[in-house]
Image (spheres, rainbow, N blue to C red):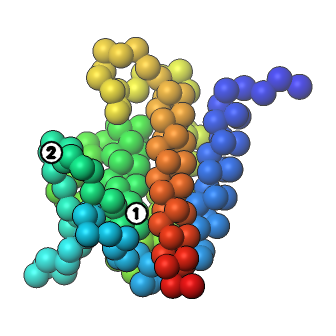
């Protein structure tokens, strides 16, 4: 029985989410803002209570190592932006996407559910103009493949940081 590209992407997404859940379920609160070295990107709580990430419009050299908190903020930012594009909404500016703090796992679970529902409703062959230019000629299928790749990359980074922290405490 032939498998469609949509079915393959859904399978890959579910596989990636399984890996994400493996690492997310093992995280302790103190893992989230652990700094693995002197040069890091993390999140900082402002006087308004919102957690804002470190950011540079031009990538620094050397590149700071992100904390798990920063990585989970990053997932929230790019995924909520991709979801807004898929649903035809205007995404909030990056500066208005805050780290969810203690509710980060719930926030990522919400995004997973919303993304899955949006993909079910979307035409896989419809044009998609995120994260590339509108004239690139790419589709919702390409966007779904990009989300899978970006999520897999960020989850691998989170897993590596989690394992490094555990090893440093052993």
Task: Please state which of residues 1 and 67 is positioned toward the viewer in this rendering.
Answer: 67
Query: Is there any visible trace of residue 87 in the rendered image?
Result: yes
Q: Residue at x 16, y 50 (%)?
A: 56
Residue 123 in view, yes or no: no
Q: Quadrant of residue 145?
A: top right
- Position of 163 compared to 11: left or right? left
Q: Position of residue 74 (x, y in %)?
A: 35, 56
Q: Residue furthest right?
A: 1
Residue drawn 15% across the image and 45% down it: 57
Classify the position of the N terminus by image quarter.
top right
Left or right: where 131 falls relative to 56: right
At which x and y percent is residue 14? Answer: 66, 50
Of the numbered discs 2 and 1, the one sitting upstream in the chain is: 2
**Which residue is farthest left?**
47
Q: Residue at x 25, y 64 (%)?
A: 39
For label 2, the SS is loop
| Residue at horizontal 70 percent and vertical 34 percent from the top | 8
For the residue pair 74 and 4, the one nearer the viewer reads as 74
Q: Quadrant of residue 133?
A: top left
Q: Residues within 10 Å of mark 2 (few under 14, many from 20)?
A: few
Residue 78 coordinates in the image, percent (x, y): 35, 48
- Nearer to us in this view, 65 or 86: 65
**Numbered badge on residue 72:** 1
Q: Nearer the viewer, mark 2 or mark 1?
A: 2
Where does the image place residue 108, in percent across and percent down from the top left?
47, 63
Gap between marks 2 and 1 measured at Cα: 19 Å
- Give the answer, above or below, for where 57 lies relative to 17: above
Position of residue 65 in the picture relative to residue 50 (left or right): right
Foreground residue, 99 or 153? 153
- Can you say which quadrant of the picture contains the C terminus? bottom right
Residue 57 badge: 2
For label 1, the SS is: helix
């Amino acid at each position: 029985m032939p498998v469609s590209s949509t079915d393959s992407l859904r399978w890959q997404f579910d596989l990636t989410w399984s890996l994400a859940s493996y690492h997310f379920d093992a995280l302790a609160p103190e893992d989230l803002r652990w700094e693995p070295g002197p040069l890091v990107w993390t999140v900082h709580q402002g006087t308004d209570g919102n957690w804002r990430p470190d950011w540079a419009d031009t990538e620094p050299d050397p590149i700071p190592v992100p904390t798990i908190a920063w990585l989970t903020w990053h997932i929230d930012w790019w995924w909520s932006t991709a979801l807004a594009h898929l649903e035809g909404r205007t995404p909030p500016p990056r500066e208005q996407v805050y780290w969810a703090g203690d509710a980060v796992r719930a926030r990522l679970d919400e995004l997973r559910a919303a993304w899955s529902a949006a993909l079910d409703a979307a035409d896989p062959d419809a044009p998609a103009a995120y994260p590339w230019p509108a004239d690139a000629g790419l589709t919702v299928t390409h966007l779904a493949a990009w989300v899978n790749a970006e999520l897999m990359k960020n989850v691998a980074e989170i897993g590596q940081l989690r394992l490094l922290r555990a090893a440093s405490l052993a």
